[in-house]
Image (cartoon, rainbow, N blue to C red):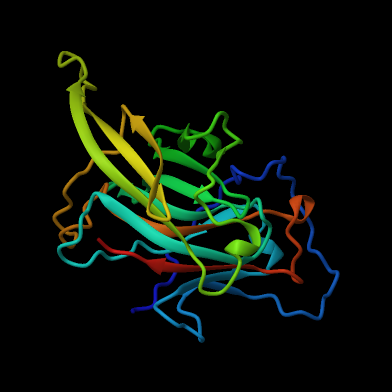
Amino acid sequence: MKKTFSVFTVFFPLILSGALLFSACPNNSNSDLEEKTILYEAPIDDQGGQYQFYTNDWRRYNSYTSSKFLDRPAGSDTHIFEIAASKLSGHEKAGYGLIFAASVDGDNGELSYYRLVITMEGVYQVEKRIFNPEAVIEEDKYKSTYFCGSTDTKGKISRLLLQGDDQGQSGVFNRIKVIREPVGERYEDPDDDTSRVIYTHKFHIYFNDQGADSFIDTDAIPIAENSESVPGTWNGNRMAFTTGVNNAAVGEDFPNNPVDVRYNLVWN
């Protein structure tokens, strides 16, 4: 399988930390250890097309880093988004998982997407981030909507997810799948100059091949053809890996204990 390198990197507060995220200084408990980062490259000991995110660099505290968009093979179902992921080390509350149904704004290259992340504690949450082209300050650049969680900072627990030592082993993966079901569309007032088509999609979430949850988005990211894209990678059909890193104040211990997550692609 072809190596993939990170070309789309996003830095946002973690949504599953369980604590406020404060800025942190480097942890020098063992300054002799090398600080390094691997951005979704196939590991040297690759046993099956794995991609690896690895870091013990404090400069990546308080961030999500995502891979480049993953190319779909011809004939795959563009409504299905599925990966397998295994977190070998790192703080148990930091999320990792899947960017799905992503779209790129053709005018400025900005992203809108859904992010489904899980933790080693079996917690999961979905966040939709929509680019706001009219934002005047950085904090308003994206609008977030949360699904499958009671608040902006708390997710839900699924017993279908392997947790802790059960999944923190080489070769043991949680399968994460989302199936999108287009439900319908409606129109805003046609007499309004800003009228647009609004889509409703239902998303079905599966963990380890078992139905876990679902949610309905009545203002879903649309599926739009991009004539310059490879068929099947149109806006609204794109996906990527994503990995979160906490900081020293809430559990990460760099450089001693790295964040090391392995991913596999699953195409349908």
Q: Residue at x 46, y 67 (%)?
A: 263
Is 184 left or right of 145, judged from the image as shown? left
Q: Residue at x 48, y 57 (%)?
A: 242
Is 12 left or right of 230, judged from the image as shown? right
In this rendering, the count of numbered labels is: 0
Where does residue 83 sit, x and y in percent of width and height? 39, 61
Of 103 and 181, which appears nearest the observer? 181
Of 210 and 246, which appears nearest the observer? 210
Is residue 108 shown to the viewer in this render? no
Q: Residue furthest bottom?
A: 44
Is residue 217 shown to the viewer in this render? yes
Where does residue 225 sit, x and y in percent of width and height? 16, 48
Residue 151, by quadrant, is top right
- Examine the rendered structure and indicate whether residue 249 appears above or below residue 37: above
Where does residue 255 sit, x and y in percent of width and height? 74, 71
Residue 56, by quadrant, is bottom right
Residue 20, by quadrant, is top right
Q: Residue at x 47, y 76 (%)?
A: 41
Is 117 left or right of 229, judged from the image as shown? right
